[in-house]
Amino acid sequence: MENKEVKVARNEMMDRPVVQKEVVEFLRNKQKPLRGKLGEIEREANEKRVPIIPHETVVFLNLLLGQIKPDKILEIGAAIGFSSSLMAQHVGENGHVTTIDRFDVMIEKAKKNYQLLGLTDKVTLLEGQAADILPTLTGEYDFIFMDSAKSKYYDFLPECIRLLKIGGMLVVDDVLQGGTILLPDEEIPKRTRAIHRKLTIFLDIVMNHPSLESSIVPLGDGLLMIVKKEKIEPSSLHAL
């Protein structure tokens, strides 16, 4: 089989840490590394600049999921399968991870990684647009991890909350956009202004909704943690 190289567009936010550079280096280099084949996948991805979750987020998720002990996990944005493989370590004997991606090259690489790690029975990769797939899923999921196109976070939110059990947690990656989320519209480049606006609306909704408990952790490019406290009407998750 032809060996395809994973090619990704340059992500400028990877080089715009939201905390001091020295602190980021400490978090990435001084915390316990992953062992075995998953650690090798992480190191190779970092060397090739493949956008996976940074090591400080890896360590945090390992600790968090070790305490939550979820049975059913949903991920939006599989990429090369690294984060879903990491999460699959925490679902227990009868648990399962479902992940979604639409890019052929990423899907091929993710499948190879699942085979390499012996996770083909633990992870189901759904191929296609998340907008088409999410409405077909039935819950309830204990934990949802969203790491997809930032402009889609607002669009995917009602389906994620529908699928999340009461007391479950939705974690959303890269919500601070290298700190640019703080800037007014006129200081945002026109090519990314629409993304900025939708992400701002998304944050306003989840951080102020009475049925959601939310917190932003400054790891990587910002990790938003959301707990669903009670049943929620989908219409309440749309901007007025």
Image (tube, grey):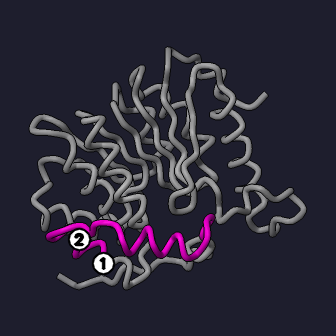
Cβ–Cβ under 8 Å for marks 1 and 2: yes
Q: Is residue 239 above or below residue 202?
A: above
Pick the quarter of the image with the N terminus.
bottom left
- Residue 39: image tag: 2
* Marks 1/2: CA–CA distance: 6 Å
- For badge 2, the amino acid type reads Gly
**4 displayed left or right of 165:** left
- Residue 199: image tag: none
Residue pictured at 9% horizontal, 38% vertical: 93
Circle 1 — which element? helix
Q: Is residue 35 above or below residue 65?
A: below
- For badge 1, the amino acid type reads Arg
Residue that carries the numbered disc 1 in the rendered image:
43
Question: Whole-percent x and y of residue 71?
Answer: 23, 33
**134 displayed left or right of 83:** right
Residue pictured at 38% horizontal, 75% vertical: 29
What segment carries the magenta color? 17-44
The image quadrant of residue 188 is: bottom right
Q: Is residue 29 magenta?
A: yes
Q: Is residue 36 magenta?
A: yes
The image quadrant of residue 111 is: bottom left
Residue pictured at 58% horizontal, 75% vertical: 21
Circle 2 — which element? helix
The image quadrant of residue 101 is: bottom left
Question: Whole-percent x and y of residue 156?
Answer: 54, 40
Q: Nearer the viewer, residue 197 or 134?
A: 197
Pick the quarter of the image with the C terminus.
top right
Question: Whole-percent x and y of residue 112?
Answer: 19, 68
**239 displayed left or right of 184:** left
Prevalent SS, magenta region: helix
